[in-house]
Amino acid sequence: MRDTLSSGLYVGLVLVAACVAQAASAATQDEPRQQICVSDRNDALERVIDSYWDAIKRMSVVRAIGVTEMTPVDVPDRIERIDADIRNYLRAAGGKRAVFILYAGRNSEGCAFVWTSSGETLYVQLPRSIGAVSDTVRRLLPLAEVEAHKRGKAARSRGLAPVGESVKKGDAASIIGELSNALLPAALREAVKDAAELTLFAPGLLSSVPFAALSVDSSDVRLGERVQILSLPFLADVTKVMPRLRTRFPPGVWWVWVPGFESARVVGDPAAGNDAEFILPPLPGARAEARHAVSAFAGRLLEGEEARARAVSDAFKESDFFYFAGHAVADPDDPLDRSFLAVHGGRLTAREIQYMTAARAPVVVLSACQTGGGRAMTAGMVGLARAFRLAGAAAVVVSLWSVNDEATARLMQTFINRLRIDPPAEALRAAVADAREHGISLLDRSAFIVFASGTMTR
């Protein structure tokens, strides 16, 4: 759903809080069994690896992934191997200063492991536990939905009528300040302040943190305007110590960015208003955005009634650049069968997507609501973004919450223009900086993140 609201909030916004609560319940059930953030760095990292293995097994229960290779848990020298693998990953940044941060912990503790392209490692005890930070994220997400629902057309569940504002507004800026202090304490701010590229792996609800909005100093320039940010889908993508997943790319395979696309495929504002559960009104901003993408990359456009599930699926499979601008829904309770892209005549679900096969490792842009959402688990978020990665996408640009149609059109047009030259994370950084200059709100301009498993450099 690319949603905005003109006459108060729908009862449907209350469902956002319910969805966050469901995700929180799933994350609690996925809680690591032992203490993680012990004083010794190597011992703590050993415990992270063990908890990740357990999480992968639990994730397999919801059929979210296919594991094709299981490295023995007791592989010798695994800390040395994971350190070496991540250093090799960071070297692929092409001489730029690159930083990798792995967040870990439980409801009662929190810590972060840091690697840099110059070879340093850092282990930091966070000032707040993962559970406390997750509670802060739960307070932010409904406010982000409120922000997105202030203008224009609204998508809502059928049978729900407009009501007054039933979700407490609160202070989003204050909450983002709390997240900044919790996730970027002084040692981490020092590590990232001069970085050109930042890769993050954040478990559970931390994967819904708008890292682009976080502060690194007293200025108004946020992290997402300073540095290219990549959100890592799987730890297995950067180290062979982890179980290998059902993807086309083994660990250690990165992409060298070459500007331009040969097979751009764009889906713009599918005529999806006939969904059985949701009212999905037309999105003129999405349609204009899609036409701009077609013009920029000489692509093929599927629009309105042309955008049926089979046509959209075929477009993805043959593309090296796939752009979807329309409505989407993320469901934390059933992330594979009830998370979907709304297309004409039906839905394209996360389960259907993850079993597709992309022929050309496309860059995928999902300019729709909640495409980065789903079920929050220790091993990562299960939903649409992960499904496209499993289908063979090199990078997936997704939204963390419902996005404003007008603001998104501005942000994404700038992103498209920069993508003619720059890799996705740099193009998004430039678009976020431009959005601030044009007065787009912090939440609107921080809603998107690049979900990628390899550094994409020029």
Image (cartoon, helix red, strand yellow):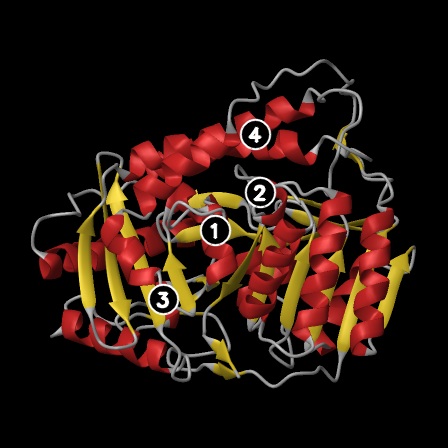
- Mark 1 neighbour class, 10 Å CA radius: few under 14, some 14 to 19, many 20 or more: many
Lateral position of residue 341 relative to residue 182, left or right: right
* Residue at point 63%, 41% (across, down): 441
* Cα distance between the residues tagged 3 and 2: 22 Å
252 relative position to 40: left or right:
right
Question: Which residue position holds label 2?
Answer: 442
Q: Which mark is residue 222?
A: 1
Which numbered mark, 1 or 4, is in the foreground of this view? 1
Q: Amino acid at mark 1?
A: Arg
Q: CA distance from mark 3 to mark 4?
A: 31 Å
Q: Secondary structure at mark 1?
A: loop
Give the residue displayed 38% in from the left and 77% down from the top.
251
Residue 206 in picture, x, y percent from top left? 40, 45
Q: Residue at x 12, y 58 (%)?
A: 41
Q: What residue would you read off at disc 3?
A: 194
Three-letter residue code for mark 4:
Leu
Q: Residue at x 56, y 57 (%)?
A: 385
Query: What residue is shown with label 4?
Result: 143
The amino acid at mark 2 is Leu
The x, y position of residue 72, in whole percent, is: 21, 70
Residue reaching furthest to the front:
219
Whether residues under marks 1 and 2 lie with C-beta atoms below 8 angstroms apart, the answer is: yes
Above or below, comparing residue 189 to residue 98 in the picture: above
In x, y percent, where is residue 48?
22, 55
Q: Where does the N terminus fall, quadrant-wise?
A: top right
- Three-letter amino acid code of the residue under disc 3: Asp
Relative to residue 409, is residue 87 depicted above or below?
below
